[in-house]
Image (spheres, rainbow, N blue to C red):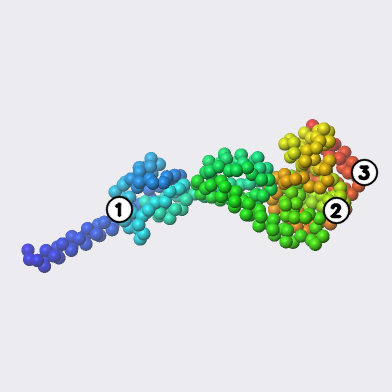
Amino acid sequence: MNLKKKIFLFFALLFSLFATINIYLNKINNKVIVFDETYYLLKKNTIQKQIVSELRTKNIDISYINWKLVSLTHQQPFIPKAGEYLIPKNSSLLQIQKILQKGKTLNRSFTLIEGSTAIDLKYNLLKNPYLTGPITELEEGIYKPDTYFFKLGYPRNKLLNQMKISQKKFLNSIWKEKSKKFVLKNKNELLILASIIQMESRNFEDSKLVASVFINRLNKKMKLQSDVTLAYGFKVNGKNITRKMLKSNNPYNTYKFHGLPPTPISYPGENALNALKNIKKTDYIYFVSDGNGRHRFSKTYSLHKKNIKLWKDSLNKDK
């Protein structure tokens, strides 16, 4: 066999080998190996052989040889990123590697509920297994109720900072649109009153009227006389307020002390803050629950007493 034939045969065999490998790779790349949506946690510094082994325990039909072959076909060096993954049903080996290479990790969420307190927030943050790190003592009011998204291992303090920035931004937007004759002196007072409104009413239309009552009382130098501030001060349910509490020197006793309590009493949401954006003008000085999630408002104490009787009657009907 002369040299030309040998060279031809060599390249023919080489071409045949590449064609065979290409056909095999196409077969691997298109073969479905994931038959159910699969959760996978890839820890830092896990070697690729271990990744394959862990995926096999999740009923994913995969071999290390195929894994290495497919990993060589990526345009960029194949480096899997640590994190939580949800591998879609009907994925191929190539699709799995692309997910791990791009770091398309699972998003987790944390929701701060309107009307929560610092005690609630701290408890929920610490019991969340997807967040990491310690937290310091939390302030009331300064974090914005909302749903926040994060990746596994996200620091609790960073999440708190996001919440704080969001609340500050929203608070600033409300403060900018305040009226010129606004009785509240600063944004902290705005936050305190919004936190009270939040606890008094969850209905936006009622919240606006509740806001008008408190603004009217502040303008008239009247005590706020709010059950929710007293309940917060004594850490009790509002239904468990006693006569002794009403006469106490607790700083949150707005039946005894004029003006606002020293701090917010909850994390107010957008509705509570918006209720103070354009104060609804009313002559209302009193309000009481109607027993059905809303409130009855009145301008005089005599009418307020009648509304209280209606509320008590509704309670007796439910017994």
7 lies left or right of 176: left
Q: Percent position (x, y) of residue 234?
A: 74, 36
Which quadrant does the C terminus fall into? top right
Give the class, few, some or many, for how many residues have Cα within 10 Å of label 2's Cα (few <14, many ≥20): few
State which mark lies toward you, 2 or 1.
2
Callout 2–callout 1 Cβ contact below 8 Å:
no
Residue named by callout 2? 219
Residue tagged 3: 302
Q: Residue at x 55, y 42 (%)?
A: 134
Q: Which badge, 2 or 1, is on the more N-terminal residue? A: 1
Kindly tell me whether residue 194 is visible in this rendering.
Answer: no
Instruction: Identify which amino acid the numbered label 1 is placed on.
Output: Leu
Disc 2 element = helix
Left or right relative to 307: residue 198:
left
Relative side of 285 to 169, left or right: right
Q: Position of residue 18 (x, y in %)?
A: 24, 59
**Residue type, numbered disc 3:** Ser
Q: Which residue appears at 33% of the width and 45% of the height? A: 49
Q: Residue at x 36, y 59 (%)?
A: 76
Q: Residue furthest bottom?
A: 4
Which of the two discs, 3 and 1, labels the residue nearer the N terminus? 1
Q: Where is mark 1, residue-wise?
A: 69
Left or right? Give the position of 54 relative to 155. Answer: left
* Of the pair 225 and 8, the residue shown nearer to us: 225
Q: Secondary structure at mark 1?
A: helix
166 lies above or below 293: below
SS type, badge 3: helix
Q: Quadrant of the N terminus?
A: bottom left
- Judged by depth in the image, the label closer to the viewer, 3 or 1, is 3
